[in-house]
Image (tube, rainbow, N blue to C red):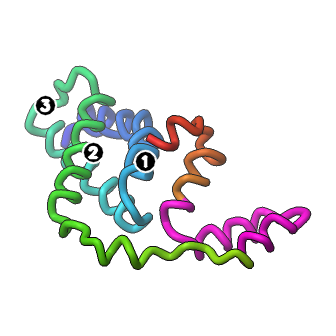
C-alpha cells in the first residue's frame, strides 16, 4: 500500500470510527460482535481503497454502507424467533425495581455494574442516551 493510500485510510478511519461504532452499537447485540464488525468493516474498506486506488468520493457514506451490509448479513444468518423465545424474557422483579427507586444515589461504577449484569438492550440504551448523547427518539430507533 502506497503512502498516499495509507494516509487516506488512516484519515478515513479517524474521521469515521466513532460514527460507525455508534451505528454498530445501535444495531448489534454484543460488544464482541460490534468489535468484530468494526474490524471487518475497515478491512473491507481497506481492500476497496486498494482496488479503487483511493478514489472513493464520500468515504463516510461508503464505510457506513459497508457497515449496513455487515449488519444485514448478520441478521440474515440468525434463526427466526419463536413464541417460546419471547416467553423466556427476563423481566426484573418488583423488589429489584423498588430497590432502584428507593436508593438516593448511585456512583458510576455501581450503575455500570448493574447495567452490565442486565440485558444487553438496556445497556445499549443507557450508553446511547447518556454516553453518546442520543435523544430518546433517536435511541429508540
First in sequence: mark 2 vs mark 1: 1
Q: CA distance from mark 2 to mark 1?
A: 9 Å
| Residue displayed at 52% across by 42% down | 139
Mark 1 nearby-residue class (10 Å; few <14, some 14–19, many ≥20): some
Locate residue 20 relative to residue 70 in the image: left or right. right
Q: Determine which quarter of the picture holds residue 49.
A: top left
Q: Secondary structure at mark 1?
A: helix
Magenta segment: 96-123
Indicate the position of residue 27 as horizontal and vertical percent values: 37, 51
Q: Nearer the viewer, mark 1 or mark 3?
A: 1
Residue 85: x %, y % from top left: 32, 75
Q: Which residue is mark 2?
A: 67
Of tags 3 and 2, the one toward the viewer is 2
Residue to which mark 3 is pinned = 53
Residue that protrudes farthest toward the left in the picture: 51
Choose the circle earlier in sequence order: 1 or 3: 1
Label 1, label 3: how many angstroms apart (C-alpha)? Answer: 25 Å
Q: Quadrant of the C terminus?
A: top left
Q: Position of residue 60 (x, y in %)?
A: 33, 30
Residue identified by numbered label 1: 21
> 82 or 53: which is nearer to us?
82
Q: Which image quadrant is residue 94 in? A: bottom right
Q: Residue lying furthest top in this view? A: 57
Amino acid at each position: 500500500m502506497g503512502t498516499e493510500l495509507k494516509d487516506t485510510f488512516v484519515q478515513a478511519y479517524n474521521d469515521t470510527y466513532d460514527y460507525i461504532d455508534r451505528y454498530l452499537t445501535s444495531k448489534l447485540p454484543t460488544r464482541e460482535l460490534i468489535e468484530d464488525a468494526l474490524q471487518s468493516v475497515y478491512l473491507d474498506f481497506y481492500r476497496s481503497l486498494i482496488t479503487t486506488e483511493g478514489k472513493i468520493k464520500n468515504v463516510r457514506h461508503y464505510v457506513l454502507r459497508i457497515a449496513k451490509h455487515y449488519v444485514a448479513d448478520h441478521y440474515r444468518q440468525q434463526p427466526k424467533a419463536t413464541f417460546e423465545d419471547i416467553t423466556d424474557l427476563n423481566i426484573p422483579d418488583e423488589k429489584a425495581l423498588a430497590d432502584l427507586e428507593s436508593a438516593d444515589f448511585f456512583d458510576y461504577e455501581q450503575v455500570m455494574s448493574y447495567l452490565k449484569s442486565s440485558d444487553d438492550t438496556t445497556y445499549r440504551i443507557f450508553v446511547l442516551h447518556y454516553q453518546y448523547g442520543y435523544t430518546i427518539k433517536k435511541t429508540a430507533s
